[in-house]
Amino acid sequence: MDTLHPQKVLGLISGSSLDGVNAAIITTDGFDIFDFGLISDIPYDDELREKLQFAHKNYQTIPNNEQKRLSNELTEFHTQIVKEIQSSDTSKIDLIGFHGHTIVHKPEEHFILDIGDGQMLANSTGIKTVSRFRQSDILSGGQGAPLSSVYHQALSVSLPKPVVFVDIGGISSLTWIGNNGEMLSFDIGPGNNIINDWVLKHSGQHMDYNGTLAALGNIHSEIVKQLLHHKFLAKHPPKAADKSTFTEKSEHLEGLNLNDGAATATQFIAEAIAYSIAFHLPEPPKLLVLCGGGALNPTLVRFIRRQLPEIEVKTSSDFNWHPQAIEAQAFAFLAARRINLIPSSYSFTTGVPNACICGEVFIPQI
């Protein structure tokens, strides 16, 4: 292999929680991280968020031309973000890692429907773009998630081992890294979506800001036990979850008041994390690093610490890694690996039979 050269890579991700787009720049060759750059969170306007929500609920009946129109609109939203970053950042971006937006993901069926046009983004920005990361894994026999594991491994170089990264986005996932660099990764399942859906339905707010509602509520332990009976939690890795995996379980919260429902949903996430660590890891971690939007919810962090008294629990902020930037940085890292033909998914992460080089490269055609 030729010598690898660091590149300045912009990662863009639109998560299932529909908050907006997370953007982050890192300098990397796909093995090492040389520098952390700009970080930005750009919320969706209400109209685009509503269109995406509608697509999630009605993906089976949306005509192809409507799906294409939404894909173009999402891509244009990302294009404007890139252009704003280009105008504010003095050094040249070499590469973009463009996740797009997942409308539906059925891991067990090896099926994914997502939107976002990598060629359109490359043409509009003039920057080489890597996209369709999950499709590459699925077409190779994997489940398409989780894909951030190799980036967590790169971040873990100086951390005590074994270490676990828990990424709490719309759903939550886990990466375990052992003393000798061994790795295991899988989706835990419940994440911010179950809190967000509850709060939106019963208050019209998009999330439980700072965990305030949960902090004021009472946990209904019997309901948490019912939620923990979900078969996905007991399933052995590799495994990946979809936004809809735990949808039917949320009906157990009905009948609770707003605060109690938020508290009970938050406790469910904490106990699901503790369950996964206890039953699915080769060895307990010395350190747990929380990242994703959930790491910014102090009530959720407190609940997790309470469930795991024997493990040191920190957030990525404690290491100067912005919690909501890590997944965007991960897709920048994956883009560099694709350009350098380095695999990003494995049997012990997504269940893909053979190590898979993830992503499709789009060259600007101007």
Image: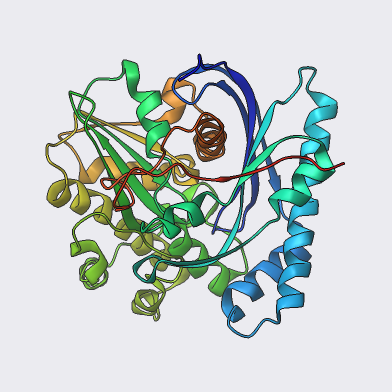
Q: Residue at 24% of width from left, 20% of height from top?
A: 160
Foreground residue, 337 or 177? 337
Location of residue 196 in the rendering, given as x and y in whole percent from the top left corner: 51, 62
**The image quarter in which residue 237 lies:** bottom left
**In this view, which residue lies farthest toward the front?**
1
Foreground residue, 63 or 235? 63
Q: Residue at 62% of width from left, 21% of height from top?
A: 7
Residue 313 appears left or right of 299? left
Count the labels in the image.
Answer: 0
Residue 236 appears left or right of 38? left
Figure quadrant of the C terminus: top right
The reply to whether residue 213 is in sight is yes
Foreground residue, 75 or 301? 75
**The image quarter in which residue 240 lies:** bottom left
Q: Residue at 57% of width from left, 52% of height from top?
A: 132
**In this view, which residue lies farthest toward the bottom?**
61
Residue 319 appears left or right of 108? right
Where is 132 relative to 306, above or below? below
Q: Residue at 35% of width from left, 29% of height from top?
A: 153
Location of residue 293 in the rendering, given as x and y in whole percent from the top left corner: 50, 45
Figure quadrant of the N terminus: top left
Location of residue 228 in the rendering, given as x and y in whole percent from the top left corner: 23, 66
Structure colour scheme = rainbow
Location of residue 106 in the rendering, given as x and y in whole percent from the top left corner: 42, 69
Residue 36 appears left or right of 80? left
The reply to whether residue 46 is in sight is no
**The image quarter in which residue 63 lies:** bottom right
